[in-house]
Image (tube, rainbow, N blue to C red):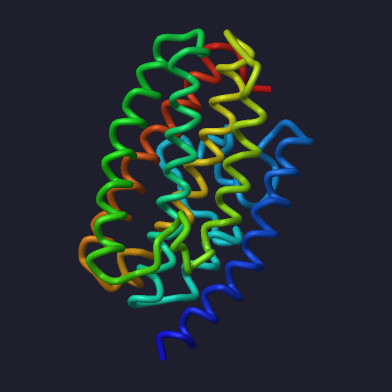
Amino acid sequence: MKNKSNIVIITIIAIVAIAGIAAFAINRNDGEMMDNNTSMISDDKSSQSTVLANKDSSGYKMFASVTGEDYDRLFLANMIAHHQGAVDMANLALTNAKHQEVKDLATAIVSAQTKEIGDMTAWQKSWSYPASSGEMMIDHSSMGMMDTNAGMMNDLNGKTGNEFDKAFLTQMMMHHQSAIDMASTGATNAYHQEVKDLTKGIITAQTKEILQMRQWQKDWGYSS
């Protein structure tokens, strides 16, 4: 039964990995958050007080389609990789950002998400789930996420000052939105209470940070 579940999960991920890479390419070429995966991040007044999951995104659809331990296994594998991408971008901001506000946000992201990576890695081991990376990796569901993270990092590398801050806010808002999409069904679909609680915490924290970054875009003249 476990082998059957793994096959289903890996099949889903193969589709999502391609969709994730395509979505990143669209955003990078257009320079704006215009595709379905990021459509909830906008300057429309109706979205100023909340950031909703985008139900049209591939991330939302993937996690809405699985429940129980299948959800937990898939969520942990992907969110560990997703968090690592945010930590990598945030570490770059500590040296390359212009505004102290961005550096302070980056520090908070590194602290919070590094702790959550540790928690999720421990849960994988405790619940006998496949590792997200390394030589013993069985569940390859996080591969597409890793590719997207690498693309985002490439877009930030070499930038400093205002150029970096503008790109960082755009990329991190997109990144946070995808986390909200992934976590939005966790309260009902996850099996373990630890995962349910984590998904709620991610939504709360990253919604707050998206709204703050959106305001900085306006304050610093980065909004188009």
| Residue sitting nearer the eye, 54 or 12 | 12
Is 41 drawn above or below residue 158 in the view shown? Answer: below
Residue 181 coordinates in the image, percent (x, y)? 48, 55
| Residue at left offset 62%, top offset 35% | 152
| Residue at left offset 46%, top offset 55% | 133
Is 120 drawn above or below residue 206 in the view shown? Answer: below
Q: Judge left or right: residue 28 versus residue 197.
A: right
**Residue at the far right in the pictured view:** 29
Q: For residue 24, which quarter of the picture?
A: top right
| Residue at left offset 60%, top offset 32% | 153
Is 102 drawn above or below residue 187 in the view shown? Answer: above
Q: For residue 129, which quarter of the picture?
A: bottom left
Q: For residue 223, which quarter of the picture?
A: top right
Is 224 drawn above or below residue 60 in the view shown? Answer: above
Q: Judge left or right: residue 26 versus residue 156.
A: right
Instruction: Locate the N terminus and report the quarter of the image it occupies.
Output: bottom left
Q: How many marks?
A: 0
Instruction: Locate the C terminus and report the quarter of the image it occupies.
Output: top right
**Residue at the far front in the pictured view:** 135
| Residue at left offset 64%, top offset 54% | 20
Residue 73 coordinates in the image, percent (x, y)? 38, 68
**Residue at the far bottom in the pictured view:** 1
Residue 122 coordinates in the image, percent (x, y)? 25, 56
Q: Judge left or right: residue 45 versus residue 123.
A: right
Residue 104 coordinates in the image, percent (x, y)? 35, 18
